[in-house]
Amino acid sequence: MRDLLTIFLSVFVAELGDKTQIATMLFATNSRVGKGGIFLASASALVVSSAIAVAGGELITRIVAPSFLRTIAGVGFILVGVWTLISASR
């Protein structure tokens, strides 16, 4: 259960304020489309993209060790954070 909570919180925080959320907010300004439909369409898109990520992760771990993937992902997130800090300070 703790792993699932970690996954939920990681994805939730990663999605806050990203392009997907901004696009969804823009779609919500369209008065011709119901808000429930916008929610269902955007939530379905996230479910499908997550399913692709899970399937892709499963395939990749058959070739590359999970510990190596975690290291690469960690380094990647750190680099993005550093890049963001540098960009913000300019």
Image: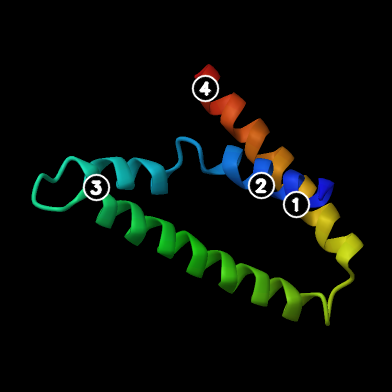
Image quadrant where residue 45 sits: bottom left
Tell me the residue that label 3 is attached to.
35
Q: Amino acid at mark 1?
A: Leu
Image quadrant where residue 67 sits: bottom right
Query: Which residue sits at x=63%, y=40%?
Result: 80
Tell me the residue that label 4 is attached to.
88
Secondary structure beneath label 1: helix
Mark 4 or mark 3: name the one nearer the start of the chain.
3
Whole-angstrom CA distance, mark 4 to mark 1, is 32 Å
Tell me the residue that label 2 is attached to.
8
Residue sitting nearer the eye, 44 or 75? 44
Mark 1 or mark 3: name the one nearer the start of the chain.
1
34 sits left or right of 80 in the view: left
Residue 33, position as x, y percentages in the image? 15, 53
Kindly report which numbered mark, 4 or 3, lies closer to the viewer in this rendering: 3
Query: Which residue sits at x=83%, y=46%?
Result: 2
Residue sitting nearer the eye, 31 or 50? 31
Secondary structure beneath label 3: helix
* Disc on res. 4: 1
Mark 4 or mark 1: name the one nearer the start of the chain.
1
**Circles 1 and 2: CB atoms closer than 8 Å:** yes
47 sits left or right of 23 in the view: right
Crowding at dot 4, Cα within 10 Å, few <14 / some 14-19 / many 20+, comes out as few
Whole-angstrom CA distance, mark 1 to mark 3, is 28 Å
Secondary structure beneath label 4: helix
Whole-angstrom CA distance, mark 2 to mark 4, is 27 Å
Mark 2 or mark 3: name the one nearer the start of the chain.
2
22 sits left or right of 6 in the view: left
Residue 26, position as x, y percentages in the image? 24, 42
Residue 81, position as x, y percentages in the image? 65, 34
Kindly report which numbered mark, 4 or 1, lies closer to the viewer in this rendering: 1
Residue sitting nearer the eye, 36 or 29? 36
